[in-house]
Image (tube, rainbow, N blue to C red):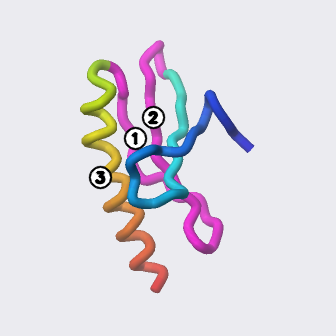
Amino acid sequence: MLSRPHADTVNGSQFPNMKELRVQSFGRPIRAFFAFDPTRTGIILCAGDKGGNEKRFYDEMIPVADREYAAHLETLK
């Protein structure tokens, strides 16, 4: 199981099980948002380079991840 500093819960998501994977690529901070659905399948929702304005990054990426996860949950119905 990955924990901080490699993975952490995303604050501000409408889903309490939303997580982010924290990795580096060529020294750049990359974040991949993921969640486990009700069947315990891990779903990678979106990813991006967090370099620069951290607040803007999360303000832009969390709604994308939430939308993708909500759409995925709809396919399970």
Q: Main secondary structure of the magenta part?
A: strand
Task: Check whether the beta carbons of the residues at disc 3 and disc 2 lie within 8 A of each other.
Answer: no
Span of residues in magenta: 25-51
Residue pictured at 36% horizontal, 70% vertical: 71
Q: Which residue is mark 1?
A: 47
Measure the C-alpha gap from mark 2 to mark 1.
Answer: 5 Å
Q: Which residue is mark 2?
A: 31
Q: Is residue 5 magenta?
A: no
- Mark 3 or 2, nearer chain start: 2
Q: Is residue 18 left or right of residue 58?
A: right
Residue occupying the far bottom of the picture: 77
Residue pictured at 27% horizontal, 23% vertical: 53
Q: Mark 1 Cα within 10 Å, few/some/many (few <14, many 20+)?
A: some
Q: What kind of residue is marked 3?
A: Pro
Q: How many labels, in total? A: 3
Q: Mark 2 Cα within 10 Å, few/some/many (few <14, many 20+)?
A: many
Measure the C-alpha gap from mark 3 to mark 2.
Answer: 14 Å
Q: What kind of residue is marked 2?
A: Arg
Task: Check whether the beta carbons of the residues at disc 1 and disc 3 lie within 8 A of each other.
Answer: no
Secondary element under disc 2, as helix, strand or loop, is strand
Secondary element under disc 1, as helix, strand or loop, is strand
Measure the C-alpha gap from mark 1 to mark 3.
Answer: 12 Å
Q: Which residue is mark 3?
A: 63
Is residue 44 placed above or below 70 in the rendered structure?
Answer: above
Residue 59 position by quadrant: top left
Secondary element under disc 3, as helix, strand or loop, is helix
